[in-house]
Amino acid sequence: MKTLFTLVLVALISLGVQAQEKASSLYLLFEFMHVEGQHGNDYWQVEDFWSGIHKQRVADKTILGWDLWSLSPSGTQQGSQYLTVTLFSSLQNMLQAMNSMDVMAYAKKAYPKMSDKELNAMLDKTVKSRDLANQVLLKQVDRTKGEFTMKVGTMITIDIMKQTDDSYEKVESELFKPWHQDMVAKGKKGSWELLRAILPAGEDTKGTHLTISMYNDIAQLSSFMEGSGGEMDMTTSLAVKEGLKTRQWKEVKIGKLQMMVR
């Protein structure tokens, strides 16, 4: 009887863990924005306006959250200067938001005292203030454990990877993730996660995955960048060398969190 109870308990715990893992699925819409210098002030006004809309979307449970990041390097020939990230609990929610979101209805909910003319003026300013350079639909594949909490001023590194072998995700999770987890435990970074691109897809896409590392502030980021990363034994070093062959490292960007809605 005791054995049966133990087996049932283990089964229930296992089901609970599986349900929790399923419930914690995270989908992300990355939108890279190119903003000309003369539109800088307008762009900040636009994103501040949109943050109110996103608060209403969170309240309505159509999204989990939204972030605005400034990116660097940010020269005129280096792509986008800003990144917005919208968080969803499912792929369906993300696709519905992209294809059937009633922006004006949300704007009226978020700003009930503004007239239709004022709301339309802000939506018109949205179009004129920036170019939506790239949209990427992503799913979170893996992440480190820890109690890290994002706040305005949080720094990130965004590494764009292109998979060259089907074992890439396994390599990230089994070989590189423990190293990132050790860095988190030692207080050298806040967190790390692996994201898989859903769309765009195909041979001509720039990347298939993103790895994101978060840092409390510029001081922690610069300290990590100047560090050695720790010692490796011969076996680990050889494994890392082979693991690096499973992807191409295309580009890295640094971001700073400017606004967030949860």
Image: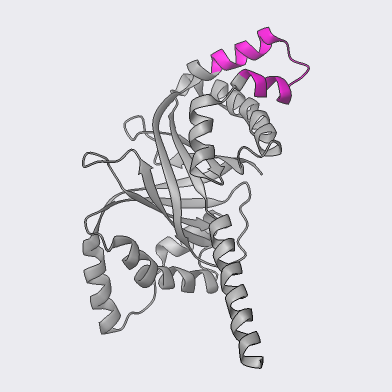
Q: Is residue 233 left or right of residue 117?
A: left
Tell me if residue 115 comes above or below residue 198 in the rendering.
Answer: above
Question: Taking 105 as reference, is 87 left or right?
Answer: left
Task: Decide which of 118, 116 is in the foreground and name it.
Answer: 116
Q: Is residue 243 left or right of residue 197?
A: left
- Can residue 54 be seen in the rendering of this structure? yes
Point out the image quarter for the N terminus. Answer: bottom right
Can you say whether 207 is above or below 182 in the image? above
Q: How far across and down, in percent of the image, does residue 129 sit?
A: 50, 19
Report x, y in % for residue 82. 47, 35
| Position above or below: 246 against 31 | below
Whether residue 37 appears in magenta in the rendering, the answer is no
From where the camera sits, is residue 228 visible? no
Image point (26%, 75%), residue name: 239
Residue depicted at x 45% and y 64% = 224
Q: Main secondary structure of the magenta part?
A: helix
**In this picture, which residue range is highlighted in magenta?**
104-125
Image coordinates for residue 9, horizontal then vertical, percent: 64, 80
Is residue 105 covered in magenta? yes
**Residue visible at 61% across and 44% down in the picture:** 64
Is the residue 90 above or below the residue 18 in the image?
Answer: above
Residue farthest to the bottom, as pictured? 2
Between residue 114 and residue 257, name the one nearer to us.
114
Instruction: Specify the quadrant that holds the C terminus.
Output: top right
| Farthest residue, direction top | 117
Point 52% across, 54% down: residue: 25
Q: For the view shown, which residue lies furthest in the front direction?
A: 1
- The location of residue 215, given as percent across then percent down, is 53, 58
